Amino acid sequence: MFTTDFWYYAPILSTMTVAIAGAINNKFNITNGIWPQIVAWITGSVLTVGGWFLGLIPLGTPTWLAIVCLCAVVGLSSNGIYDIPFIQSIVDKIKFLQQKNKKA
């Protein structure tokens, strides 16, 4: 059985992931490409699985697929800070399409 308590811990894990991944990226000078995101995904996964194994995060008895999904949630939710240029390019494209539609 899977418990929904994880969603109370997800913001804390995401914040910890951002802080720890940022420290790792600064220490090893990881700044280019997708590597900062990969560091965040791995950090989020380690924090989630480690917290579950240590009994710090009550997840009930989830399947391995649920654990993988939870790791993805923590890793991806913490990546918003690293991917600001990508988000900005999407916003710029949306603005361009809106202006194009107004002219038509």
Image: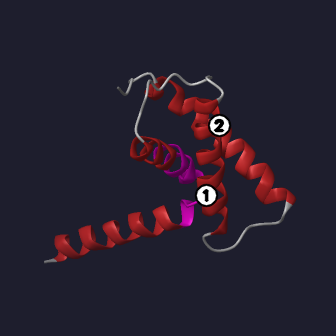
If you read the primary sequence from the N terminus, does the residue marked by circle 2 or circle 1 appear first? Answer: 2
Q: Residue at x 69, y 73 (%)?
A: 32
Q: Is residue 98 left or right of residue 62?
A: left
Residue 91 is left or right of residue 18, and the answer is left
Secondary structure of residue under mark 1: loop
Residue under label 2, please give it: 50
As drawn, 59 above or below 30: above
Q: Position of residue 23 (x, y in %)?
A: 80, 50
Q: Which residues are magenta?
A: 73-85
Quadrant assignment for the C terminus:
bottom left
Identity, as a three-letter code, of the amino acid under mark 2: Gly
Percent position (x, y) of residue 28? 84, 63
The amino acid type, in three-letter code, at marker 1 is: Tyr
The residue positioned 18% from the left and 72% from the top of the image is 101
Residue 82 badge: 1
Residue at 54% from the left image edge and 32% from the top image edge: 11
